[in-house]
Amino acid sequence: MTTAPPTAGSPPAVPPVDRALKRERFGWYSYDWAMSVFNTSVTTVFLAPYLTAIAESAADADGRIHPLGISVPPGSFFGYVLSLSVLLQVLVLPLTGAIADRSGHKRQMLATFATLGSLCTMAMFFVADQRYLLGAALFIVANLCFGAATVVYYSWLPDLAGPDERDAVSSRGWAFGYLGGALLLAVSLGLFTQYESLGLTEGEAVRICLASAGVWWAGFTVVSVTLLRNRRPREVVGDPRGGALSGGFRQLGSTLRDLRRYPLTLWFLGAYLLFNDGVQTIIGVSAQYGKEQLELSQTTLVSAILLVQVVAFFGALALGRIAAVIGAKRTVLGALVAWTGVLVAAYFLEAGAAVQFYALAVVIGFVMGGTQALSRSLFSQLIPPGKEAEYFGFYEISDRGTSWLGPFLFALTYQFTDSYRYAIFSLVFFFVVGGFLLARLNMRQAIVEAGNTPPERV
């Protein structure tokens, strides 16, 4: 879109509003609104403590369960399930990105993955009695689809925003997601706290809350699929008429070889995989830590997570504005310092200290959205043009509740120490090392080497 240059002495011309772009951006924001309830209601709030309770009810006389013949304590089960789901994503997500970039059928792929994932989430209504293996299987498939759909969704960002707009657009998307997650969680909290007056058991209330997340995810995805549009692939390896799967493997192989040309992009990805493992593990195990170590009620845990969502809406927008002044990299580094402080404070929290838990929730909410939104926009600047979905496939391996090192370290530390305090404190490693790597990275040079134009402030 071009405009005529202003004549001498006239005010600068204001570019006409691109209504099609605004409409497509709204569709992009809407998918964050749709999918975030899976992260909030399922992964963060209800499933971990509920699946742990189901596993405890199935434990033998020694207090152990034996999934696939492996003896583990019920307290470690969800951490191992989360880790397994991500090990599968390590194999699937980069290939998903390669197929999306090669085929150009992103709308169809988004619809397919979101539909399958939401159906598995709805089916969690049937996880009752001692069926912890059913719950684990449904979560693994749903989380795999969640990750695959997110890869495709993220890859639209470079098409919808230029270098200087990307931090703001990414932050708005996260803010939409937190607002949607908070709204459904508020409804779920109302249902959970009133389950007796509604003639439900506590387990039935939790199962309804889990299934409602699937209904929400599926319903609002329709808006996104309707408004977003496909684009012609910019770079295709091999015969473009070849099969999608075989062509995707060839495309992925080409990208893996090509990655060596962008060492600074790999440097950022390594830093992100570390510190985001810490972020996602805190999100994934916070309810379990609050219930098992701090002995807080389920109502307190759900209301604290709701508080995080509400604060995160404002935090994502606020940190986006801060990034416009000091740069996204400095803003993320400041947020990582705050995350480290959160873990130190969590280690010293007293049992039953609900007020202290709420105070930590406020801090987490403020830095959480900005950390994730600005990391996403930073990485989008480091992707060679035409390979957005493929590179976001590697990025998403450790994004939004799909980390595996963090949950594994948490579960392993608990298994050896029998202490959730040591388990939560062990996550400091990810923020310290990841932050150090990010601080050493020359972002402007990395953006130029990837073939992109740096924004004014990085």
Image (tube, rainbow, N blue to C red):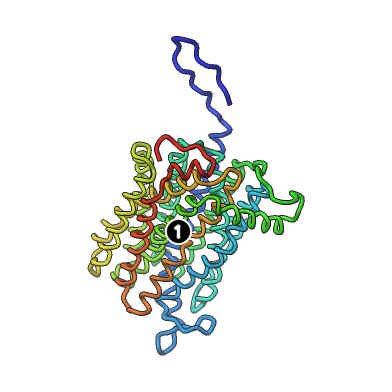
Locate residue 78: give its quadrant: bottom left
- Residue pointed to by mark 1: 273
Residue 426 vs 399, above or below: the answer is below
Residue 219 screen position, x and y as percent:
56, 51
Q: Residue at x 37, y 40 (%)?
A: 327
* SS type, badge 1: helix
In the orientation shown, which residue stands out farthest toward the top?
9
Residue 209 appears in the rendering: no
Whether residue 430 sits left or right of residue 352 in the image: it is: right
Instruction: Name above or below for residue 65 compared with residue 284.
Output: below
Residue positioned 66% across, 44% down in the render = 233
Task: Report the side of 364 relative to 405 (left or right).
Answer: left
Query: What residue lies at 35% left-to-right and 64% top-to-bottom?
Result: 429
Q: Please tell me which residue lies in front, 138 or 214.
A: 138
User: Count of labels shown?
Assistant: 1
Would you identify the image quadrant in which residue 251 lies? bottom right
Side (left or right) of 141 relative to 58: right
Q: Amino acid at mark 1?
A: Leu
- Residue at 58% x, 64% y: name it: 91
State the image coordinates of residue 330 (x, y, percent, origin top left): 34, 45
Q: Measured from the top left, where is residue 435 in percent x and y?
A: 36, 55
Q: Quadrant of the N terminus?
A: top right
- Residue 436 location, quadrant: bottom left
Give the position of the C terminus as an image quadrant: top left
- Depicted 190 relative to depicted 70: above or below: above
Q: Is residue 394 visible?
A: yes
Q: Residue furthest bottom?
A: 61
Picture coordinates of residue 300 (x, y %)?
Answer: 31, 62
- Crowd class of label 1 (few under 14; some 14 to 19; many from 20; radius 10 Å): many
